[in-house]
Image: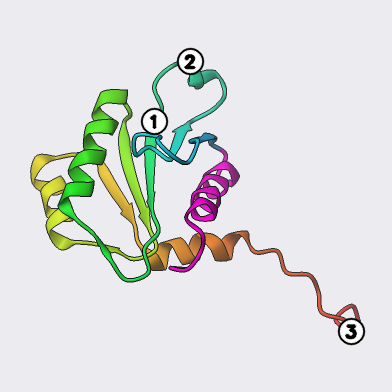
Amino acid sequence: MGRIHWRNFERLTTEFFRRQGYEVDLGKGTKDGGVDVRVWTDKDSKAGPPIMLIQCKRYEKDVVGIETVKAFWADVHFEGAEKGLIATTCSVSKDSKRLCEVRKWPMCFAEADEVQKWARTMWRHAPAVGDDE
């Protein structure tokens, strides 16, 4: 998963939430200010702030650190979203998680294992030849 193209990782995340029934907008990809996906409950709610902002971090081995979490929280707060989600192909540092807990920031994290589960739920398996018996 760490080798997926960063833009495809953003698309995968967007599609996962779309399939969960949310209205989603994928950001333009570059110079997006750190917000990759905006999520609303439905089309009607798009007139207001998103319920969630998502930042995707596709790393092979790196860890999402405090600086990233602080910067993203500023975007979540500025846009008036209910919460923020950092989705990553690696992990989020314990210090980052603790910071959110102590400051009571409504932030959550989808790390490598959970992101792989997302991908698995979206796989479509065609029956193998001879399985139609």
Instruction: Look at mark 3 in the image and give the residue it sits on.
Output: 130
**Horizontally, is 43 left or right of 74 in the view?**
right
53, above or below 12, in the image? above
Q: Compared with residue 85, is residue 94 higher up or lower down, i.e. above or below?
A: below
Q: CA distance from mark 1 to mark 2?
A: 12 Å
Query: Callout 3, which amino acid?
Result: Gly
Res 59 quadrant in image: bottom left
Q: Which mark is residue 47?
A: 2
In front of the other: 101 or 32:
32
Location of residue 98 (image quadrant): bottom left
Pointers 3 and 2 in contact (C-beta within 8 Å) = no
- What residue is shown at x 44% (from left), y 40% (from top)? 30
The residue drawn where x is 18% and y is 39% is 105
Between 9 and 43, the one nearer to me in the picture = 9
Q: Which residues are magenta?
A: 1-21
- In terms of secondary structure, where does tag 3 sit? loop
Quick check: is 108 in the magenta stretch? no
Q: Position of residue 122 (x, y in %)?
A: 61, 59
Coordinates of residue 21 in the picture (x, y in percent): 57, 39
Q: Is residue 15 magenta?
A: yes
Q: Which residue is mark 1?
A: 51
